[in-house]
């Protein structure tokens, strides 16, 4: 059955950073719904979260949690999604999953609504829709309009990823280390196992046999799937930086057809969900502190790559809120596509 105009909603992982952001965005965008169920682990069950002036009680996630649920947002990690998403689907729910569990499943659409939202026009319900990796979303929002214009032959990405990408515990740990520094105390490292403040290090995902970490591999594979083009050569280096939220990335592009930097700027200024911040005179470009809390992805440092033939290469710098467009907002936008789908009957 298609999603009703006012679905019954469940949020799995409601007490986490993305789950709380989902609640905020559902309110801000006045997403229509009949009821809202908050689900989390047994550790969080019984706690309350304020939403729209009410205190909602968090329930323990169980196999019986999806009775009469039409739409379930999953933001509790891949293992939880793999276990409970099929249960939710069997009970008739559409699942929008923020984890990596189903992204590369050929039967699961991987969606950034501004880029490939039309895929959802023929989405069979119930089923799973996957939200891409947060850094991949931020990068692809900025470069896809250029790819559509002239084609990208090669893309080199270096990410600078905030603590928010690793969850609430990492954000709190970074804040604690700032307090430790201010008080002249040794850094608290029980969560991170290392100094995070005043430091940068390789993304904390596991390293594969080829030397790439899982985050780098995700961005490459997901770019190919979303674009439907495996021929684009993509290489990525992912770094964790001591920023609370909003990921950044430096991107170098090689084009298949010529594109002048002024043309690229015009294309990006017209792209939905993108804001150009590119003031050379004031040395003002995208910064994570400015991207925090914004729906748009910021893009700037738009300049020709002079190491390539004229108009065949470009450099960009992008910043986007990992908790919003990189996760929760993208999930809500997917839900909006499904509720507004032309295939839906009300």
Image: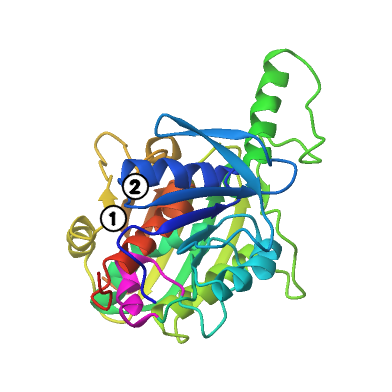
SS for dot 1:
loop
> Which percent across, then down, holds residue 151?
31, 79
Q: What secondary structure is the stretch in magenta mostly built from?
A: helix
* Magenta stretch bounds: 110-123
Q: 50 or 321, which lies in front?
A: 50
Instruction: Kindly identify the residue that appears in the image at 61 percent across and 58 percent down.
Output: 65
Q: Is residue 36 above or below residue 339?
A: above
Q: Which quarter of the figure has residue 104? A: bottom right
Q: Which quarter of the figure has residue 187? A: top right
> Which percent across, then down, holds residue 319?
41, 48
Instruction: Kindly identify the residue that appears in the image at 32 percent across and 71 percent down.
Output: 117
| Residue 214 located within the stretch drawn in magenta | no
Determine contact: label 1, label 2, CB under 8 Å. Answer: yes
Count residues near mark 1 (Cα–Cα under 10 Å), then give few for <14, some for 14-19, many for 20+: some
- Image quarter where the C terminus lies is bottom left
Q: Is residue 110 above or below residue 228?
A: above
| Numbered badge on residue 273 | 1
Numbered label tally: 2
Q: Is residue 116 above or below residue 205?
A: below
> Which percent across, then down, holds residue 211?
73, 69
Q: Is residue 213 visible?
A: no
Instruction: Kindly identify the residue that appears in the image at 39 percent across and 69 percent down.
Output: 253
> Which percent across, then down, holds residue 161?
56, 49
Q: What residue did someone put label 2 on?
A: 295
Q: Which quarter of the figure has residue 99? A: bottom right
Count residues near mark 2 (Cα–Cα under 10 Å), then give few for <14, some for 14-19, many for 20+: many
| Residue 111 located within the stretch drawn in magenta | yes
Q: Is residue 278 visible?
A: yes
Q: 117 or 291, which lies in front?
A: 117
Q: Is residue 115 left or right of residue 38?
A: left
């Amino acid at each position: 059955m298609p999603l009703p105009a006012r679905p019954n909603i469940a949020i799995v992982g409601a007490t986490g950073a993305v789950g709380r952001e989902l609640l905020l965005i559902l309110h801000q965008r006045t997403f229509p719904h009949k009821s809202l169920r908050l689900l989390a682990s047994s550790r969080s069950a019984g706690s309350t979260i304020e939403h729209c002036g009410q205190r909602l009680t968090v329930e323990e996630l169980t196999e019986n949690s999806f009775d009469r649920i039409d739409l379930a947002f999953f933001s509790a990690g891949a293992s939880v999604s793999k276990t409970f998403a099929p249960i939710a689907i069997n009970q008739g729910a559409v699942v929008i999953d923020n984890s990596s569990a189903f992204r590369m499943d050929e039967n699961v659409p991987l969606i950034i609504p501004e880029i490939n939202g039309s895929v959802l026009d023929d989405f069979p319900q119930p089923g799973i829709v996957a939200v891409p990796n947060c850094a991949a979303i931020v990068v692809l929002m900025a470069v896809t309009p250029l790819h559509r214009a002239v084609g990208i032959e090669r893309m080199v990405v270096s990410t600078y990823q905030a603590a928010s990408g690793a969850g609430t515990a990492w954000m709190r740990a970074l804040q604690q280390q700032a307090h430790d520094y201010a008080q002249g105390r040794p850094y608290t490292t029980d969560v991170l196992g290392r100094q995070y403040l005043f430091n940068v290090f390789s993304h904390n995902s596991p390293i594969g046999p080829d030397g790439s970490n899982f985050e780098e591999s995700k961005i490459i594979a997901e770019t190919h799937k979303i674009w439907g083009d495996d021929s684009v050569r993509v290489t990525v280096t992912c770094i964790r930086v001591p920023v609370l939220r909003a990921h950044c990335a430096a991107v170098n592009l090689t084009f298949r057809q010529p594109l002048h930097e002024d043309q690229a700027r015009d294309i990006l200024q017209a792209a939905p969900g993108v804001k150009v911040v590119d003031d050379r005179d004031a040395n003002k470009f995208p910064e994570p502190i400015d991207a925090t809390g914004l729906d748009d992805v910021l893009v700037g440092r738009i300049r020709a790559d002079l190491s390539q033939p004229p108009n065949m290469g470009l450099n960009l710098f992008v910043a986007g809120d990992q908790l919003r467009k990189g996760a929760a907002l993208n999930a809500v936008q997917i839900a909006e596509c499904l509720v507004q789908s032309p295939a839906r009957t009300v």
